[in-house]
Image (spheres, rainbow, N blue to C red):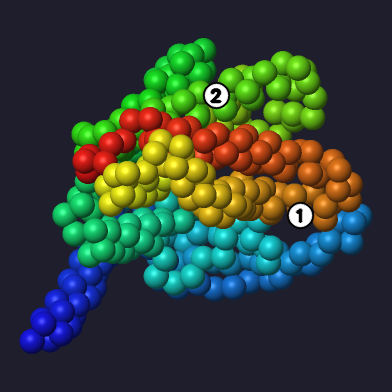
Amino acid sequence: MKAKLTSKMTWVQIIGVLLFCLVAVFLTAHDDSLYTKPIFQVTRVQNGKVTKMSDEFHNTDYYHQQTLYGHITNGKHAGEALTIQNSFSNSGAMDHEYKPNQKLFIILHTKPKLHATVKDLKRDVPIVLLLALAVSLLMIVLKVHGVTVIGSIAINTLLFWGAVKLDHANNGAAVIPIFSILAVIFCFITLFLVMGWNKKMLVTLSAVLSATAITVLLTLLVFGVTHERGMYYESMQYVTQLPKPLFLAEVLIGVLGAVMDEATDIVASLATLKQERPELSKMQIFTSGRQIGKSIMGPLINVLFFIFMAETLPMTLLYLKNGNTWHYSFSMNMSLGMTSSLISGIGIVLTVILSSLFAGLWIKGDER
């Protein structure tokens, strides 16, 4: 009977996820009226001539002309038919090939007659689908606890948006103080919602904030001693404010996320161990924490390395394909990512020590 009930609940959950995702996708696919920007739905595409182009480095690409037929779906011109010319390349580096049934954001021109140019592809449907899947899986796996996880993500998103707006209003003059305060608020809210108000939460909070602060201070010390040689801030594209403080803010938030994950795992494991074996001494708890840290430290550092370096790979390959040396391509694209991963690695190592130390000092055997 128990197996049948579990199987039944599983099928109910699967059907619920599918229905939730389908409803979310349907509503998003028909939300054009919510946008103030004009949206164009492609109904037919006619491909035109193809042009072969090459450069002095023997890189070859093909450019295609296409005519898009469709109609506007929102605004005062809703329902009006339009024909838009578009060009795209095989590489797709700076353009897109559009297909029937896709929706596009367009820029309308009324003179000498109504015509338009394509601005970008409307991508909200796949984003909402992924979001619906993530929310559904969190609710299935974590049950009621998933609400607090989703709530912490939503609150942190709003806080981050507010910090960006505040930084923009101050023209980047106080980027470090703004994101330092934001990091503390991030950490407190996330740990409070996920772990609750207890000794484990306070130990984790202390370890995370201490490790992050020490990591940033060590970074500033190294930058001061080396005079930041090898730091190519000019590679931060489209930055309209001082790049160094912005880079430090980026590193601060990145380190915080990594050490919070690690500290939570270590402190939770040590609290359970101390609860089951209250006779363990502080040094034994500290040693156990180091052993736990050793098992998760390597994979976590590698994950961060892949995240920081993978986002720079396309531009690095583009530099290499255009005749630049490996040293120049690495310096202009990957050097900041490598620096970020090294700084995060320092934070991860410090977190193992501090989490184990604070847990050994403060967690008692009768605390849950």
Estimate the x, y position of residue 145 in percent, counting from the top left: 20, 52
Which residue is label 1 attached to?
317
Q: In the rendering, at what x and y percent does residue 336 appear?
A: 68, 36
Q: Where is residue 278? Give x, y as percent.
A: 29, 44
- Image position of 48 with respect to 171: above or below: below
Q: Residue at x 86, y 48 (%)?
A: 326
Q: Is mark 1 on a helix, strand or loop?
A: helix
Would residue 337 be seen by someone viewing this image from the given angle? yes
Task: Assign a secondary structure to mark 2.
Answer: helix
- Measuring 78% from the left and 20% from the top, which residue is drawn there? 226
Q: In this view, does 171 lie to the left or right of 15?
A: right
Using the image, determine if residue 52 lies above or below residue 37: below
Residue marked by disc 2: 214
Q: Can residue 194 be seen in this view?
A: no
Q: Which of marks 1 and 2 is nearer the N terminus?
A: 2
Extreme residue toward the left, this view? 1
Q: Residue at x 24, y 58 (%)?
A: 142
